[in-house]
Every structure is written in C-alpha cells, then in structure tokens.
Image: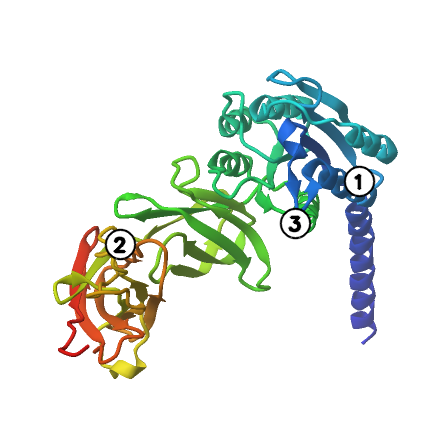
C-alpha cells in the first residue's frame, strides 16, 4: 500500500511539472503580425446607405485598432491617396512595428481618396515588408474595386508563396458592385491561403476585419479542392465549409467561371469537415453536400461537381395564336398528381420574343398564367413562376419531368400537362394549346 502511494505521489509531481512547463509557453505566444493594405482610390467617396465608404472604413478601422492587443505588430500600406491617375501612388505609411494605436488611427483618418487602384503593386510592397520574416504575417487588403493598373494580384501572391515568403493573404471586397467579377481578388486570397470576404455595410466590414485579424496564419494543413462544371464549361458555385464536430463555419468561397478559382482550393487544418456546394444561376436542384471530408496534413482532397442541365422550351397557342399561360414542370413518378411539386415554372405571354420559352398566347387579350415543373421521380416541385417581364428559362438536371401550365382569369380554360425527358445540353420544346371554345 505504501509502495502504491509513493508511485502515485511521483506521478502527480511529474504531472504538475509538465503543467508548469506548458502553461507559460501558451501564455507567451505572441499575437500575429498584421499588415493592412487600404484602398484610398477616388471610388472610396462612393456611398453605402448615404455614407461615404471612406468614412465607414475610418470608423470601422478605428474601432478595430482599439481592440488589438498592445503587443501586436502592425504595418500600413495605402494606395491612391496622393495623386489622381498615378499607378505608382503607393505608400508604406507604417512599417511593421509595435502598434501605436493613436498614431495609426490618425494616419488612416488623414487619408484623402483621389487616385487609381494599383492592387498588385500594393501587395508587392506589403510582401516586401515581411519577405525576410520568420514569423507568418496576416496581410489584409481592403478594396472597393478591382485592379485598374494592369496588374495580376493572384500572380503576385502565388509568386511570393512559391518563393517561400511566410504570410497569409485575406481580401475584403468592400461595397464592390454586384455585377463585378471578383475572381481576381478571390484568387489572391486562395493563393495566399486566406479568406475572401464580401462586405456591403459597416457591420459586415467590421465582422470581416475582425475575423481576418483573429484568424492565425495557417502554415500547415491539407487542401480541399472543389471543381464545378456545367455542360462542359466551368460553373459558378458557392462553397461553405463547416467543422464536422462543432458545426462552426471555418471557410467559404466561390469558384466563378475562371480557371484562376475553379477548382477552388481551401487550406484547412487536419480534421473532419462538411461542405455545402450551391450552384448559382441554376433552376433545378442546386445543392450538393459532402458529409465526411477528412483532411490530412500535406494532402489534397479533390471533388468535382457536375451541374449539367438541359433546357425546356414551351410554346402555348390558342386558336392558332400565341397565348399567355402559366407552366409548371414536375417529375414523373408514382405519386398522385396533387402530391407532386414542380421543379420549375414560368409564363409565356403573347409576344413572339417570349413565346416559346416557358410561356403562352391568347386569341385577343393576354391571359394571366402560371407554369410549374415537377420532378417525375421524386414528385418534388423544382420551380414555378407567374408573370415576368422577359422570357423565363429553366436550367434543370437531366431527367424526367411533368410540366403544368394553367391559364388564369380565363373562363373554361383547361389546365395543360405534358411529360418530358430532358437530356444534357439540349433544349426541350413543348407546345401547349389553350384553344377557345365557341362562345368564349
């Protein structure tokens, strides 16, 4: 008994020694160095909800800086703040050094946007500040637009990574117009093993910057590669990665239709994850899921998703003339017709420019209508629509469907229904005739 007690005491003494050795090491870990690249081009005077973007950025950055640890080292690079039309207007305002919060905030508030957007050379300048550093650094670019000086941000980041420079590149697209293709910025974040954030308000900008600052540079791990195609071409999808155990979001991105970002490669710590892949501009079943992704150190897990579709074109006539009608497409299956949901729907109108598509006609006056598409195998409604100002097209996965068209506000109109098989890359055309009976 005495011998057992002696062993126990020795064991617990050893355990306490280990704890005492490990605890200080964790406490003394320095915060990650940070370099901010700020867009001070003329477009920053644009507004979001009535407030200039530069004013929003100053306020958000001021609050963020106040929250930073006093032992963090910060650098600041800005472009476009001194001269109009000058692609060389890039300045390192603060080298990477212990943070002076008051001076840093004042420097940012004094920026006066007026110039161009030389993103690539600004990134080069920021990378130059840490080229010989042994500690990985977060570089965070905040830009409200795309490169305007002919550079390639993605190539700059890729070349620096290949040269062994230790950094992570995060990019925040702040108030960028919705129709802009930001693949070059997403690619810069991807090449820099970082994240791309789309921020369109003060709150979103604040959340993006806080996440970028708090996320420690990840220098080890494995890659998840997602490639998306449709009908033989690259396809645009949104990707969301979550931790399999906690359900927390850990990464996200888009592929676009660019070979710079498709396949999209995301660097993740070794572990288990889930992914949701949502195809954009797709009318059918546009969600794919991966429920058990195992990421192993220094390895790449590759997945390819094919969202190929065919097109259903429906022409509706009544007594020889184009007729306005609603159309629903449903899948062929065992369920009763009333239980089946449409997979697509639309309206034909009476114009030749819109009929056929998923549309219709009338003998004398327009007929309000609805169109629906139902998956023939599952009975689920895929899509439906009513009146629209232009032709409605449904891009659907290959398969069997039921298409329903109902003319509304027309007496004695009999709903039309047809079955159709859709093949990859082909357009299926239907003609639905809502003939008027005598006396109508």
Please tell me which residue lies in front, 44 or 228: 44
Image coordinates of residue 107 in percent, x first then y, are 80, 28
- Picture residue at 53% right of the left edge, 50% below the top: 252
Within 10 angstroms of label 3, few (less than 14), some, or many (20 or more) residues? some
Q: Secondary structure at mark 3?
A: helix
Task: Identify the residue position indicated by label 2 in the image.
Answer: 354
Marks 3 and 1, Cα distance to the nearest angstrom? 15 Å
Give the mark nearest the N terminus, 1 or 2: 1
Marks 1 and 2, Cα distance to the nearest angstrom? 53 Å
Image coordinates of residue 105 in percent, x first then y, are 82, 34
- Quick check: 197 left or right of 102? left
Task: Identify the residue position indicated by label 1 in the image.
Answer: 62
Task: Determine the image quadrant of residue 348.
Answer: bottom left
Give the mark nearest the N terminus, 3 or 1: 1
Give the mark nearest the N terminus, 3 or 2: 3
Q: Secondary structure at mark 2?
A: loop
Q: Nearer the viewer, mark 3 or mark 2?
A: 2
């Amino acid at each position: 008994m005495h011998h057992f007690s002696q062993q126990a005491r020795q064991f617990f003494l050893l355990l306490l020694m280990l704890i005492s050795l490990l605890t200080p090491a964790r406490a003394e870990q320095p915060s990650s160095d940070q370099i901010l690249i700020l867009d001070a081009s003329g477009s920053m005077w644009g507004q979001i909800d009535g407030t200039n973007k530069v004013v929003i950025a100053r306020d958000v950055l001021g609050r963020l800086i106040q929250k930073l640890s006093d032992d963090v080292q910060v650098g600041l690079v800005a472009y476009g703040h001194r001269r109009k039309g000058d692609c060389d207007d890039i300045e390192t305002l603060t080298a990477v050094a212990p943070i002076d919060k008051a001076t840093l905030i004042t420097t940012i508030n004094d920026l006066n946007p007026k110039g161009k957007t030389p993103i690539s050379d600004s990134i080069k300048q920021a990378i130059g500040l840490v080229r010989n550093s042994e500690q990985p650094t977060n570089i965070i670019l905040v830009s409200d637009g795309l490169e305007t000086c002919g550079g390639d941000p993605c190539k700059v980041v890729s070349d620096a990574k290949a040269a062994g420079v230790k950094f992570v590149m995060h990019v925040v697209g702040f108030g960028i117009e919705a129709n802009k293709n930001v693949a070059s910025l997403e690619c810069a974040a991807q090449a820099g093993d970082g994240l791309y954030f789309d921020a369109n308000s003060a709150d979103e900008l604040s959340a993006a910057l806080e996440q970028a600052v708090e996320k420690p540079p990840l220098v080890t791990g494995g890659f998840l590669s997602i490639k998306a195609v449709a009908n033989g071409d690259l396809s645009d999808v949104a990707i969301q990665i979550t931790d399999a155990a906690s359900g927390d979001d850990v990464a996200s991105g888009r592929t676009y239709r660019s070979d710079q970002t498709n396949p999209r490669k995301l660097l993740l710590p070794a572990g288990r994850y889930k992914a949701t892949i949502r195809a954009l501009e797709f009318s059918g079943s546009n969600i794919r899921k991966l429920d058990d992704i195992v990421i192993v150190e220094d390895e790449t897990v590759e997945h390819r998703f094919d969202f190929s579709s065919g097109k259903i074109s429906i022409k509706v006539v009544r007594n020889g003339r184009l007729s306005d009608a609603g159309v629903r497409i449903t899948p062929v299956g065992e369920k009763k017709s009333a239980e089946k949901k449409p997979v697509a729907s639309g309206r034909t109108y009476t114009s030749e420019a819109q009929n056929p598509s998923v549309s219709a006609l009338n003998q004398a006056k327009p007929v309000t209508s609805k169109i629906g598409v139902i998956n023939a195998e599952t009975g689920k409604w895929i899509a439906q629509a009513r009146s629209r100002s232009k032709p409605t097209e449904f891009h659907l996965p290959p398969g069997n469907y039921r298409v329903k068209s109902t003319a509304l506000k027309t007496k004695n109109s009999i709903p039309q229904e047809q079955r159709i098989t859709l093949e990859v890359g082909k357009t299926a055309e239907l003609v639905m005739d809502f003939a008027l009976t005598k006396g109508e």
